[in-house]
Image: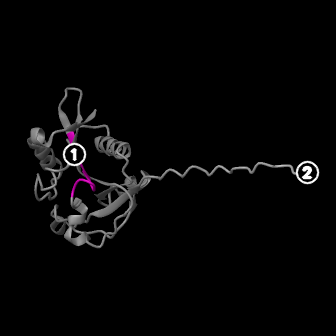
Amino acid sequence: MIQPISFHEHRDTIARLRREVYTSGLLRDIDEFDEVAHHFGLFNSKGEITGVVRVLRSDEVPKLELQSESDAQDLVYPSDGLIMEVSRGCASKSITGMPLMKLAAAMQDYAKQHHAAHVVTKSGTRLLPLYKLLGFRVFGRPFYSDYFDDRRTGLMSIPIIYDFVKPAPPAAVEEKEEEVMVW
């Protein structure tokens, strides 16, 4: 089960899970975006949080995390509608059942329910094919993240975006002219 969680009440759990999962170079367990993000927890049957993810909304923050990356300043973001950024998704290494996919699907549902026009995130090369199967597309060149030790590890972040399909406008109803018979 995935539910919203309070960052302040679960700060230690969020930090612990991030340390456990991001072993290849997360520079800070908690960053400046955590205070303003919406956080979600993946709960096991015992009610324990075994995974976390966060969402930033373009209508609530001056900059998304991706917009703050020094090597990604050339990214062009859509100007139409709400953008939600999903980041820091992680789940305990001891659980099975594709927890990251459950978190990703839940965040897509959340974005859709809140009328987002787009969802952005970053991926590595290993997960990129899976994201593409889900409808994401690459929208910029790979870059070294300021939030991970990418330069040391050589791993690069790839910015990806999902565009929700806009509903087609209702078809115009043709008004038939009334025929008038004149004598």
Q: Identify the image quadrant of the N terminus.
A: top left
User: Which numbered tag is attached to residue 183?
Assistant: 2
Q: Residue 5 lies in magenta, yes or no?
A: no
* Residue extending farthest front: 183
| x then y, percent, for residue 35 | 13, 50
Q: Residues within 10 Å of mark 2 (few under 14, many from 20)?
A: few
Q: Which residue is mark 1?
A: 38
Q: Say which element carries label 1.
A: strand
| x then y, percent, for residue 36 | 17, 50
Q: Is residue 21 left or right of residue 97?
A: left
* Residue extending farthest top: 46
Residue type of the residue flagged with mark 1? His
Residue type of the residue flagged with mark 2? Trp
Q: Nearer the viewer, residue 33 or 139?
A: 33
Q: CA distance from mark 1 to mark 2?
A: 73 Å
Q: Nearer the viewer, residue 143 or 154?
A: 143
User: Which numbered tag is attached to residue 159?
Assistant: none
> Which quadrant of the view contains residue 102?
top left
* Magenta region, residue range: 51-61
Residue drawn at (25%, 66%) of the image: 156
**Disc number lying in front (1 or 2):** 2
Q: Is residue 31 left or right of residue 101?
A: left
The answer to whether one can see residue 155 in this image is: no
Q: Say which element carries label 2.
A: loop
Mark 1 or mark 2: whose residue is earlier in sequence = 1
